[in-house]
Image: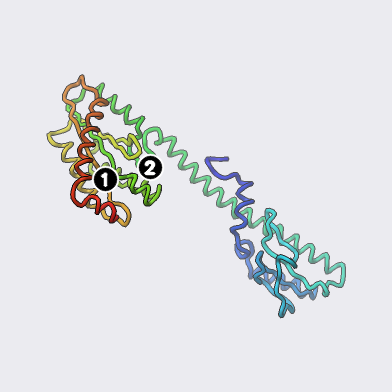
Amino acid sequence: MAFGLVPLEKRLKDHIRNYSLDQIFDIGVLSDYLDSINKLTGLSLLLTDRHGEKAVSLGNFVGFKPDTVHAPGRKIRVEERTIAHLYVKEEELDTEAQKEIIDNLVIMLTRQAEKTYESAELSLYADELEKRLEKEQYRVTHGQKEDALTGVLNSTYFDNKLHVVDRSQVVPVAAVCANINDWKYVNDHFGDEESDRLIKVVADILKEEAKPEYIIGRCGGDFFNILIPMAEDDEAKEYCARVQQRCLDFEDEHLAPSVACGFVLKYNVEQKLKDLLSDAEYEMFDNKFEIKNAPGYRERLEKA
């Protein structure tokens, strides 16, 4: 299996059920061709789809109702599935030449259907494979650094950057911990797609409110850590306030984003940012308790 794609052989067997007759054949062209057979042989011909719906009718089939279950016509099959039935009035088949023409017609229609179907699926498969290759290339190029969902640093690379900042002995540094409030509520009520979108919405706000030098990482499912090197007075506090206000201002049918934040400042080069982020997490939980017990919080969450 290439890059998570269903193997082509299985794909061909499974996808044929999704194709209608007019996706396999150009009905106008096919009608002209069958008309030429009708005129050449004098045989009445009726082509239906797999369910018995008439597609082309030539000759006298007045009052005839195709029964594809108990009295199927000559079957046109692709990947062992019937896609069409060709009915011929048996009483009109007088000669071996006529029978041979009809047999060859079924073979020709089958081969044409197989060729058209395989060509269509190969084209789709190639497009999907190209997209997967592009994603794989992006993952190879960026995936070692970035979180795939949000585009911020992943936890491993964030930790690497954290150690770099520690070793650089830059002070002051603000260590910020941010956590999405009631992410599980969204996941339980609206599913993975909406809860993932909530994470992305919050990540986008964190990035948009940050300065270029800020280091942002997704360090857990709904947890983010942010480092602010050379933080100015109240810079971390003001950053958190902007993020939280942006969340409150966000309007959406399902999402009511809310973020709890905590921050601690590193003034001593001997301090380790890992330890300070743990302290910031305690501050964040205090903020979370305050937010979730504030008037109107629950109403906003449940209204969304």
**Quarter of the image where the N terminus is located:** top right
- 89 or 275: which is nearer to us? 275
Characterize the local packing of mark 1: few (<14), some (14-19) or many (20 or more) Cα atoms within 10 angstroms. some
Secondary element type, mark 1: helix
Q: Is any part of residue 241 visible from this angle?
A: yes
Which amino acid does the dot numbered 1 rest on? Ile
Secondary element type, mark 2: loop
Q: How many numbered discs sit on the rendered protein?
A: 2
Characterize the local packing of mark 2: few (<14), some (14-19) or many (20 or more) Cα atoms within 10 angstroms. few
- 68 or 82: which is nearer to us? 68
The alpha-carbon separation of the residues under discs 2 and 1 comes to 14 Å
Mark closest to the chain's N terminus, 2 or 1: 2
Residue placed under numbered mark 2 in the picture:
149
Q: Is residue 53 above or below residue 273?
A: below
Res 72 label:
none
Which amino acid does the dot numbered 2 rest on? Leu
The image quarter in which residue 76 lies = bottom right
| Relative image position of residue 70 (x, y in whole percent) | 74, 66
Which residue lies most toward the right here?
95
Rendered image coloring scheme: rainbow
Q: Residue at x 18, y 26 (%)?
A: 266
Residue placed under numbered mark 1 in the picture:
205
Q: Is any part of residue 165 visible from this angle?
A: no
The image quarter in which residue 253 lies = bottom left
Q: Is residue 302 above or below residue 278?
A: below
Which residue lies most toward the top here?
270
